[in-house]
Image: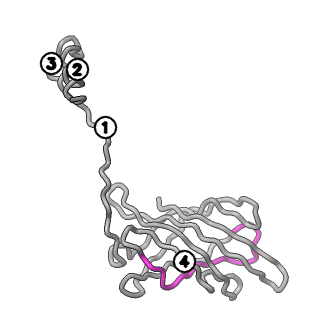
Amino acid sequence: LGCQKEELNIADNPANGGNSQKANTVAVVNERTSVTSNFTVDGVVGNYKGEINQVKMNGNKKPSVPNRIVKITPNSSNKFNLSVDGFSIGKMPADLTINIKGLTLNSDGTFSGSFSNGVNLLLTDYPANIRGKFFKKDNATKVEFTLESSGTYLLFVNFDASVHFDTY
């Protein structure tokens, strides 16, 4: 009934000096129905170009790292590997690499996990906690995730790092 009343109001008050063709045009507001995408490992395998942002090292914000490639490779039926080639954060003495194996992909595109050796710095592996999701935008699959890691390198230098990745 509300829609009928709306249409009557539009017809009673024609736009553009009585141009009835435009007066009866009804704009549909984006009413997204809840559509569940079924994400599969085969469907998300590939390279995703984006930016490492929201970078924090020992509680201090650091500059974003643009033009990074996240590589997604298959691991098993509903598991995948996620890797990012070396990049530098702040004044770290070497590049940090991300290499997580065996992330479980949920059918809604989400993933999370804790891994004992997901980050590498100076030939040493460090633990990583990751949470993220694959999603559809502009008919393309995109990925975003947040990764946290901490440890001690060079025997006495502690670090606590957090980064976020967004697909371009």
Q: Which residues are magenta?
A: 89-105
**What distance separates the C-alpha of mark 1 from that of mark 3?**
21 Å
What amino acid type is highlighted by mark number 1? Answer: Val
Q: Could you say which disc has been placed on residue 113 in the image?
A: 4
Q: Is residue 61 left or right of residue 7?
A: right
Q: Earlier in the sequence, mark 2 or mark 3?
A: 2
Quadrant location of residue 68? bottom right
Horizontal and vertical percent position of residue 117 = 62, 86
**What distance separates the C-alpha of mark 4 from that of mark 3?**
59 Å
What amino acid type is highlighted by mark number 4? Answer: Gly
- What colour scheme has been applied to the protein in the rendered image? one colour
Quadrant location of residue 98? bottom right
Say what secondary structure mark 2 lies in.
Answer: helix
At x 25%, y 29%, the residue is: 2
Q: Pointer 2: what residue?
A: 10
* Residue located farthest toward the top when viewing the structure as drawn: 17
Q: Earlier in the sequence, mark 4 or mark 3?
A: 3
Q: Is residue 26 left or right of residue 69?
A: left
Say what secondary structure mark 1 lies in.
Answer: loop
* Proximity of marks 2 and 3: CB atoms separated by less than 8 Å: no
**What distance separates the C-alpha of mark 2 from that of mark 4?**
53 Å
The question of residue 77 being in magenta is answered with no
Q: Residues within 10 Å of mark 3 (few under 14, many from 20)?
A: some
Q: Pointer 3: what residue?
A: 20
* Residue located farthest toward the left when viewing the structure as drawn: 21
Say what secondary structure mark 3 lies in.
Answer: helix
Q: Earlier in the sequence, mark 2 or mark 4?
A: 2
Q: Pointer 1: what residue?
A: 29
At x 37%, y 56%, the residue is: 137
What amino acid type is highlighted by mark number 2? Answer: Ile
